[in-house]
Image: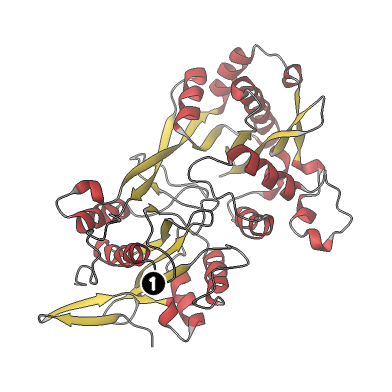
Amino acid sequence: MLTNIETTVNNQRYVEPLPMSAVYNKQQFITQFASLHHHSIQPVLVHQLLATQANISLNDTTSSYFPHTVAEFWILYDDLHRPIACAGANTAMADSSVGYVGLFEARDVDAGVIVLNAATNWLRRGGVGQFQPVRQILGPVNLTTWLHYRLRVDDDPAPSMSYEPDHPKFYQTAFAKLCSFLCGADHKAGFVKAVDYYTMYYDMDPFIDRLSKYCKDVPLESTGFALQAWNTLDFTASLNPERHPALSAEDNVARRVYDLSIRMFGGKDLFDEQVTRETHRRVVLNDLISRPEVDLASLLDLSSFVVDIKTGQDVGYLACWVENQDTLVMKTVGYVPEVHHTRVFAYTILETNKRARQAWGCTRNALALMNDRTTSQTEYIVGPSTRHVYRLYVHKPQVDGTGPITSYGPTLS
């Protein structure tokens, strides 16, 4: 039977969540950990990620999925030995001075604070002598920024869609209480806002009308670029290239998406450049296509590469699909830095929305997980939107040894 680690200090009972490294029956631990994720993230994916880490010895810092990282995971149990909260922590691939806290689920605020505190303290201590104490902790990040992360913090009553964080409102409270617990009177030392991202929701018809006026009904090809739809390429084979040795470079959709992602986002904050191609296709893309809300036929029909007509080179891509039978989700719309993308951005979005309305009957769209600059540009062109807001938090521990690293979290009531 798995249960908490309990300590009594001055007749006060303290509990610490159970770390996976202390468990012999890791399969049971992983199953219980994944069971807490059945609403907000795929349990199959969580099981896959933890199983990979469970095969790594304590002193090994390599993994077939996340190389050069050290990770730990915790479960908190109630008095009936039922799992009620969990969290994970790991060092970032490219910079071991940065740590991530994520894979967070909890049944109530206090339980959430306890597992977050355990994960944060583990990173601030340097694990069990496995790495140098980190100088910056980001959360919630699920092992890598290529996967789901952030908390939704807006007040819009519409439920989260498949790509959005989906969690109770008290998760924000858990991070706020953890901030107070970590920093005491100095509120600058706890978790604070790092950055916000946005999804913009529009009704399709007025959106297309306004964007058409901006583009002056001139075709995309007039800019020197063209769209190449994924449904003309061999997307399925590209997810398993080892089984398809004759796969052409053009048909290798997964490789092209990965290469463009590195070019588009490399060097930017909060981007894990060292994620391998194998991890990208086996974890990130499979996470996308295995969600039941994602219509694969619409994904292949509406997703596309942006190609330079003269050179034939990829300069960007759009990952899109239809959700809830009426909403076009534009999950990734990106271009390499050499492309002055504001107008190209508008043209490609316009063409994709027209296709979604005509072929799939879409009446709404969602420009998903955009940064502040892109959100402002879009609303300048097509007008205000209904926004969903997602927040990433940061904590910068004191590195001189004077910061409060506690052995015990709040008591479990």
Q: Is residue 5 above or below residue 46?
A: below
Task: Please give left or right for residue 348 compared with residue 231 in the image.
Answer: left
The x, y position of residue 27, in whole percent, is: 51, 81
Residue under the point 35% across and 49% down: 394
Residue under the point 31% across and 65% down: 121
Neighbours of disc 1 within 10 Å: few (<14), some (14-19), many (20+): many
Q: Nearer the viewer, residue 96 or 346?
A: 96
Q: Residue furthest left?
A: 10
Query: Which of the 4 quarters of the picture holds residue 218?
Result: top right
Q: Is residue 219 above or below residue 255?
A: above
Q: Which amino acid type is shown beneath numbered disc 1?
A: Trp
> In the rendered image, which quarter contains the N terminus?
bottom left
The x, y position of residue 382, in whole percent, is: 51, 20
> In the rendered image, which quarter contains the C terminus?
bottom left
Indicate the secondary structure of the residue bearing disc 1. Answer: strand
Task: Please give left or right for residue 350 compared with residue 91 in the image.
Answer: right
Query: Which of the 4 quarters of the picture holds residue 177?
Result: bottom left
Residue under the point 45% across and 54% down: 141
Residue under the point 22% across and 81% down: 7
The x, y position of residue 49, in whole percent, is: 55, 67
The x, y position of residue 171, in whole percent, is: 32, 55
State the residue position of label 1: 74
Task: Please give left or right for residue 2 compared with residue 92 in the image.
Answer: left
Q: Nearer the viewer, residue 171 or 158?
A: 171
Q: Nearer the viewer, residue 345 or 213?
A: 345
> Could you tell me how many numbered marks the image carries?
1
